[in-house]
């Protein structure tokens, strides 16, 4: 009917709000001018429902305008409530509780469903769709895009972390390879030395024994590099040694992986000194790290008499003891200078330094 009375498009809001007969009686052009004297919506502006005038009825009153144009989950619940409200009204007019019967075939057979009611329902549904459902959908798309971007960022970070882990693993493998090369070089040196001795003495019977001794010395040296000795740790009956050692190391902010932990030496009932504790770590780097921080232990209350030392051989312990005696003599003879042990030798300095004085704690 409209197409026979007009030469252009009809304003959507005028169809929804005005009397249908009044709209039909007006010739509409494509110039963008209002379709009626009372309509303030040019045709071009009304081609989208985004310019709809706010609707007011019992269904739309369930909706609240967003604050500063921001939609949230509250508006989702409100849209659901408004939709349920208009569906209930439609079902009531149709005398049918099934909302799936809100179809053209059912509406045509209900004389109680007037044109005004159809316009009201159409206007309400369009307003809800235009002013709430579409913005909420856009917000949801924006949130999904943001979450997707964040997921991509986390995946990139994960890949970066994996690359870092791979790099650290390669460094560990290289470190182990270097240690193996060092052991191999030492064994070869010892074998050459004993081979020369055998050649000079022509004692072939002694060669195998010396080679075995050389290998044993190298292996023992490599094992000791992964060990630490704790002196002065009180010995009690039924003690949980691992836990006590972990507590000592925690005082200096160290938590290495302890592979083995045991008291060394024979327990003597009349002894006033506790037996030393030998602990084995996973690698020599952890041992070096603990020794660097061992000085901190003397600043902790209750730990002043506990010392952490490298695992030395008997000859090394004897040499270190002599070095300590020489250090005492140096400090006594030259009290105005600072003396300390570094790299198995005594170093003297004119500058007093607390960190330097504590170097002797690790030896």
Image: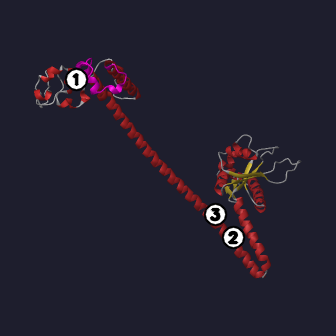
Looking at the picture, does residue 228 appear above or below residue 221? above
Residue 102 lies in quadrant: top left
Q: Which mark is residue 179?
A: 3
Local packing at callout 3 (Cα closer than 10 Å; few below 14, some 14-19, many 20+) is some
Q: Residue 230: x and y, percent?
A: 75, 50
Local packing at callout 2 (Cα closer than 10 Å; few below 14, some 14-19, many 20+) is some
Contact check, label 2 and label 3, Cβ < 8 Å: no
The quarter of the image holding the C terminus is bottom right
Q: Which mark is residue 47?
A: none
Distance, label 3 to label 1, CA atoms, is 87 Å
Contact check, label 3 and label 1, Cβ < 8 Å: no
Q: Is residue 179 left or right of residue 14?
A: right
Element marked by disc 2: helix
61 within the magenta span: no
Q: Residue 260: x and y, percent?
A: 72, 52
Q: Residue 131: x and y, percent?
A: 30, 27
Residue at figure coordinates x 74%, y 75% from the top left: 194
The quarter of the image holding the N terminus is top left
Element marked by disc 1: helix
Q: Which of marks 2 and 3 is nearer the N terminus?
A: 3
**Which residue position holds label 2?**
187
Element marked by disc 3: helix
Looking at the picture, does residue 342 appear above or below residue 299? below
Q: What stretch is highlighted in magenta?
A: 94-119
Q: Residue 16 carries which label?
A: 1
Residue at figure coordinates x 44%, y 44% from the top left: 151
- Say which of 69 and 87 sits in front: 87
- Say which of 141 and 203 sits in front: 141
Q: Earlier in the sequence, mark 1 or mark 2?
A: 1
């Amino acid at each position: 009917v409209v197409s026979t009375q007009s030469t252009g498009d009809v304003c959507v809001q005028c169809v929804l709000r005005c009397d249908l007969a009044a709209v039909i009686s007006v010739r509409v052009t494509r110039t963008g001018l209002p379709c009626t004297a009372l309509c303030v919506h040019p045709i071009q502006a009304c081609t989208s429902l985004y310019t709809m005038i706010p609707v007011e009825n019992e269904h739309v009153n369930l909706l609240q305008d967003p604050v500063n144009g921001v939609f949230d989950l509250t508006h989702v619940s409100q849209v659901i409530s408004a939709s349920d409200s208009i569906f209930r009204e439609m079902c009531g007019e149709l005398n049918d509780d099934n909302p799936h019967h809100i179809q053209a075939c059912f509406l045509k057979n209900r004389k109680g469903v007037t044109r005004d009611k159809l316009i009201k329902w159409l206007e309400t549904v369009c307003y809800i769709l235009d002013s709430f459902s579409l913005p909420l959908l856009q917000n949801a798309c924006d949130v999904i895009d943001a979450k997707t971007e964040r997921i991509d960022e986390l995946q990139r970070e994960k890949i970066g972390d994996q690359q870092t882990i791979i790099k650290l693993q390669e460094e560990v493998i290289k470190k182990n390879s270097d240690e193996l090369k060092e052991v191999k070089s030492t064994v070869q040196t010892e074998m050459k030395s004993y081979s020369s001795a055998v050649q000079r003495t022509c004692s072939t019977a002694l060669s195998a024994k010396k080679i075995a001794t050389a290998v044993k010395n190298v292996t023992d040296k490599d094992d000791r590099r992964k060990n630490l000795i704790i002196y002065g740790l009180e010995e009690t009956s039924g003690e949980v040694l691992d836990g006590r050692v972990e507590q000592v190391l925690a005082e200096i902010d160290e938590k290495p992986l302890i592979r083995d932990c045991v008291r060394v030496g024979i327990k003597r009932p009349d002894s006033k000194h506790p037996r030393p504790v030998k602990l084995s770590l996973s690698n020599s780097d952890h041992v070096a790290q603990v020794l660097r921080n061992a000085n901190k232990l003397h600043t902790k209350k209750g730990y002043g008499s506990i010392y952490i030392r490298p695992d030395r051989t008997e000859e090394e312990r004897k040499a270190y003891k002599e070095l300590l005696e020489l250090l005492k003599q140096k400090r006594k003879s030259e009290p105005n200078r600072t003396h300390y042990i570094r790299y198995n030798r005594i170093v003297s300095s004119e500058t007093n330094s607390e960190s330097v004085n504590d170097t002797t704690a690790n030896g």
